Image (spheres, grey):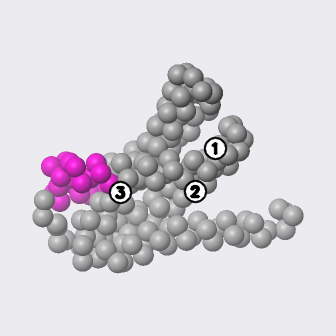
Amino acid sequence: MSPDHSSARAGTFTGLFLITLATLTYQLLLTRIFSVTMYYHFAFVAISVTMFGMAVGALVVYGRPAVFTSQRLNARLAQASLGFAITIVASFLAHLWLPFRPELSLTGILTVVLTYGVLSIPFTFSGIVVALALTRFPHQVSALYAADLAGAAHHCRYLRGAADSPGDH
């Protein structure tokens, strides 16, 4: 598929900013929840779940060029964003509902794989949004990547402000 040379509008920049902000926020939430609902060392798996899901999303975009055409770009961005929002709630509730038994048995392995599979779904939608935004507007990739990083940076700035607040000491 040849790249579309149309320009990304303000909504694309805003959407990318918000998706990356929400992605990092959800990843942090999972890290905190994992440390409570599972053994503490599983908290770091949230990073792997995020990277796996986003990579799957990028592979979906790459592997299905007929689905992600330039004529349907805005619709696909909106659908993936909505999918991200819905599956955050659904996957989190599924995580709380699914039993987690990290034991060396078939049941234990299946519960771990199922939990991580379900939790990676929102990140797959996030990966689709990021991949579409960064690949379909090649002449604006630096500005779009800046919006991506700004979303993540805003999250980190918020966390730093929360950690510095007097109520946490």
Circle 1: is it few (<14), some (14-19), or many (20+) Cα within 10 Å? some
Residue 60 highlighted magenta (yes or no): yes
Q: Give the residue drawn at x 57%, y 70%.
A: 154
Q: Earlier in the sequence, mark 2 or mark 1?
A: 2
| Distance Cα–Cα, label 3 vs label 2 | 16 Å
Question: Are circles 3 and 1 on residues that touch, CB within 8 Å?
Answer: no
Q: Earlier in the sequence, mark 3 or mark 1?
A: 1
Mark carried by residue 25: 2
Secondary structure that dominates the magenta span: helix
Q: Is residue 125 visible?
A: no
Indicate left or right for 47 with 130 as reference.
right
Q: Give the number of the mark in front: 3 or 1.
A: 1
Q: Quadrant of the C terminus?
A: bottom right
In the rendered structure, which segment of residues is drawn in magenta?
A: 58-78
> In the current view of this chain or complex, which residue is farthest to the left?
2
| Of 125 and 34, the residue lying toward us | 34
Vertical side of 161 occupied by 130: above or below? above
Task: Say which amino acid is labelled 1.
Answer: Phe
Provide the secondary structure element on which disc 3 rests: helix
| Residue topped by disc 1 | 42
Q: Earlier in the sequence, mark 3 or mark 2?
A: 2
Indicate left or right for 15 with 135 as reference.
right
Residue 9 falls in which quadrant of the image? Answer: bottom left
User: Residue 5 placed where, x, y %?
Assistant: 17, 72
| Residue topped by disc 3 | 129
User: Residue 3 placed where, x, y %?
Assistant: 16, 66
User: Residue 147 placed where, x, y %?
Assistant: 43, 72
